[in-house]
Image (spheres, helix red, strand yellow):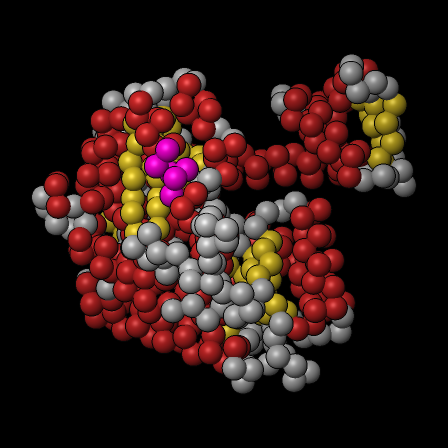
Amino acid sequence: MVSLEEGVIANADEQRQVGHYWLRSPELAPEATITEHINREITRVEAFGKGILDKSIVTPSGQPFTDVLWIGIGGSGLGPLLMIKALQETGVGLPFHFFDNVDPQGMSCILKELGSRLKTTLVVVVSKSGTTPEPNLGMQQARVRLEGTGNSWSHQAVAITMSDSQLDQQAKQENWLARFDMFDWVGGRTSITSAVGLVPAALIGADLRKFLEGAATMDAVTRVQDLRRNPAALMAASWYVAGDGRGKRDMVIIPYRDRLEVFSRYLQQLVMESLGKRHDRNGKVVHQGIAVYGNKGSTDQHAYVQQLRDGIDNFFATFIEVLENPSDIPRVQGDYPGDFLNGFLQGTRSALSEGGRQSITLTMEHFNAYSLGALIALFERAVGLYGELINVNAYHQPGVEAGKKAAAAILTLQSQIETFLADGLFHSIKEIQQEIDSDNTEAIFLILRHLCGSNQKYIIKGDWGQPLTMEFRLQC
């Protein structure tokens, strides 16, 4: 971990350093230019957020911005979503809407929800490389709809991407409203303390400096090379013991605060993308990883706690509690919600312990931007340390890249099928297969099913239950 922070190449696949720790302690960066760049970006993000909220930065028509449409996938969507859910106060900052998938129905719902307010919506596009298909597709849909209202895309669009990426070049050429840097040495799952998390914080009026301070403070604590005084090392060691060093137990995250409702989803990517590896660093097949799922307490009392208590013993629970409660919720007829919340937490933990089930409890005095930064940094360091214990590279993602390549191959196959069917004649699956020279019969069938389901111009003959008897044609 010392070497990592000093700037060694940690992601050999992409020849990348891993420097998310520098984002909250820029003075630790291995080069002065990096330190200056980080500090400059933080200042720029603060100024931009202030300008949007104090209405000195407005739409081309002179109206203040009313909403944010955030377009990002993976960590570029989960990190901002966590920031909004965890830190936004009622009536403060702008409401957020997310394109974090390529589901057409989801996009349609968001655009309908925005309605005429799209004219006063700030659109933020997040893509590190600038070539990732999902944010690019979301951008295309948002842009067509926005320009269809007669508004100027470039005066309402913001890019968060690597310097000189395809997206950065486009934003520069078209003179977008703002551009913020994603650094090459920051992976998506650890990007929340970069502009990916700081821009949302700025746009909801959250204290982004305190958020960074909390992360930096936890980083310092988790650098201590003494197991018993290092909370991340203790947590990583607990994960290792619980799962016999093979991930044999799932990690169940149960935060007893509504504001942390999406924290388990955030940790799914951080933990599972980092640790879920086929090979260790010596090339040996190990099939490592820890599965993560969860829900907020006390909702869990009425959901899957029954199985946790009495079902298969294949997990360890992580309870997260906050001691401080808001002052505007009084006792009514002697009852206080916080007492019941604490009672459910303690009762559930006791019930699991009595049943021989394992758990970890994390306690915070307060919940705010500072403590959220510390909580995220704690898990980031624990993931890194656990990766060392099981000898896997926690900072690359070959499985994700393989999935992207497979998806690209399917899209290429679809294009070939569409081209062949453009002759307007009926063709069987076998004829299509022979024409495009593919032995992937299942993929051809699934593509045809997709085309017929989403495009009324395709006509079919035959029974879906017997695919090889079917014929397809495009109605010209």
Please give the count of numbered marks on the rendered protein. Answer: 0
User: Which quadrant holds residue 65?
Assistant: bottom right
- 224 or 338: which is nearer to us? 338
Q: Residue at x 43, y 18 (%)?
A: 311
| Image height of 341 relative to 46, above or below | above
Q: Residue at x 61, y 68 (%)?
A: 67
Q: Residue at x 52, y 31 (%)?
A: 303
User: Which quadrant holds residue 174?
Assistant: bottom right
Q: Is residue 339 magenta?
A: no
Q: Residue at x 20, y 67 (%)?
A: 27
Q: Which residues are magenta?
A: 342-347
- 166 or 227: which is nearer to us? 227
Q: Main secondary structure of the magenta part?
A: helix
Residue at the far left: name it. 226
The x, y position of residue 274, in whole percent, is: 35, 39
Q: Is residue 345 magenta?
A: yes
| Image height of 167 relative to 45, above or below | above
